[in-house]
């Protein structure tokens, strides 16, 4: 967890952004203009040494020269990524930049044609998703509503342990989750359909915890949520990182909120990494502000 203490110190002084943030609409760029401007930044792509430095000098999740996509379509073109154990990393960029494809590739949902993905010293490039979850401790939290509405909250949690050999073990772990999140415990016998948007997102996160993962891949945690629930979800993720030592890699369309949360921020354009810095530094970067933060 190299660099964690200095990162935490920086977070204490970081400007707090609540809900959707306070982006300005004074500068409006077309999608094409954003893509053109962002492509210009590719000449400033960070070195591998810089990525290792941002990861505290000891990367836990490491991607090197990754080429990946779907079928014959390549989306990621030689992507590098480094994040230390217990750190958080947020990916931002224009639509179609390949942000979710990075998460899909780490979890085993894409066709990888080149490069390597490592967890610690272990090569996990070609493991299947169930192997990533069961044997590598990597959980993927989908951006879409993935709860089972007709099942109770309790039954939804049990589904998170479908890879466990003993159903009783899944139930025991569900009790641990209920102890951690009383909000869910109060609704354990109710169908998930009655939950608010924020509670459903909490259930999705909690269900992923049944397998006790070390790495959380979180796709658009704020999507479709009211501002008050966005704050709640990010507080939950902050607790998982700083109280439980989880490593978090996320994609977040609310760039301000994501960069405020994350230790490290990456900007992707056309399947390539063009900028990398501490999250609060990217918030102050004029190019990032103009292209992705609304002013």
Image (cartoon, rainbow, N blue to C red):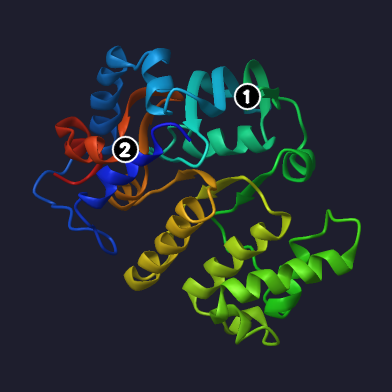
Q: Quadrant of the C terminus?
A: top left
What residue is drawn where x is 41% and y is 63%?
235
x 66%, y 22%: residue? 121
Write the residue at 54% across / 80% down: 183
Q: CA distance from mark 1 to mark 2?
A: 27 Å
Residue positioned most to the left: 26
Q: Nearer the viewer, mark 1 or mark 2?
A: 2
Residue closest to the eye, 51 or 254: 51
Where disc 1 sits, the SS reads strand
> Is the residue 53 above or below the residue 134 in the image?
above
Q: Is residue 224 shown left or right of residue 102?
A: left
In the image as oriented, which residue stretches furthest toward the right? 165
Asked if marks 1 and 2 touch (Cβ < 8 Å), the reply is: no
In terms of depth relative to the viewer, which is nearer, 189 or 245? Answer: 245
Residue assigned mark 2: 6
Look at the picture and state if 175 lies above or below 161.
Answer: below
Q: Residues within 10 Å of mark 2 (few under 14, many from 20)?
A: few
Q: Is residue 154 above or below residue 110?
A: below
Task: Choose top left, top right, bottom left or bottom right for residue 186.
Answer: bottom right
Foreground: 286 or 260? Answer: 260
Q: Crowding near pointer 1: few (<14 within 10 Å), some, many (20+)? A: many
Q: Is residue 126 left or right of residue 138?
A: right
Q: Which mark is residue 117?
A: 1
User: Residue 21, position in %: x, y?
Assistant: 23, 58
Disc number placed over residue 199 in the picture, else none? none
Image position, residue 221 (x, y; %): 46, 56
Q: Quadrant of residue 96?
A: top left
């Amino acid at each position: 967890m190299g660099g964690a203490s200095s990162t935490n110190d920086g977070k204490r002084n970081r400007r707090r952004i609540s809900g959707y943030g306070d982006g300005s609409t004074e500068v409006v760029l077309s999608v094409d203009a954003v893509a053109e401007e962002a492509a210009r930044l590719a000449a400033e792509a960070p070195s591998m040494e810089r990525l290792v430095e941002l990861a505290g000098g000891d990367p836990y999740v490491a991607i090197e020269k990754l080429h990946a996509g779907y079928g014959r379509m390549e989306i990621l073109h030689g992507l590098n990524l480094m994040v230390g154990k217990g750190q958080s990393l947020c990916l931002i960029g224009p639509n179609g930049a390949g942000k979710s494809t990075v998460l899909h590739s780490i979890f085993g949902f894409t066709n990888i044609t080149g490069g390597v993905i490592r967890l610690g010293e272990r090569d996990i490039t070609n493991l299947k998703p169930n192997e990533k979850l069961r044997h590598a401790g990597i959980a993927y939290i989908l951006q879409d509503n993935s709860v089972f509405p007709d099942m109770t909250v309790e039954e939804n949690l049990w589904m998170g342990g479908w890879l466990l050999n003993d159903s009783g073990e899944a139930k025991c772990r569900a009790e641990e989750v209920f102890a951690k999140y009383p909000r869910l415990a109060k609704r354990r016998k109710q169908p998930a359909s009655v939950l608010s948007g924020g509670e459903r997102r909490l259930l999705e996160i909690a269900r992923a915890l049944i397998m006790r993962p070390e790495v959380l891949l979180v796709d658009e945690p704020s999507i479709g949520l009211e501002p008050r629930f966005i704050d709640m979800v990010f507080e939950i993720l902050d607790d998982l990182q700083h109280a439980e030592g989880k490593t978090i890699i996320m994609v977040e369309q609310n760039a301000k909120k994501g960069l405020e949360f994350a230790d490290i921020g990456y900007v992707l354009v056309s399947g390539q990494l063009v900028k990398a810095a501490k999250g609060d530094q990217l918030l102050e970067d004029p190019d990032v502000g103009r292209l992705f933060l609304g002013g």
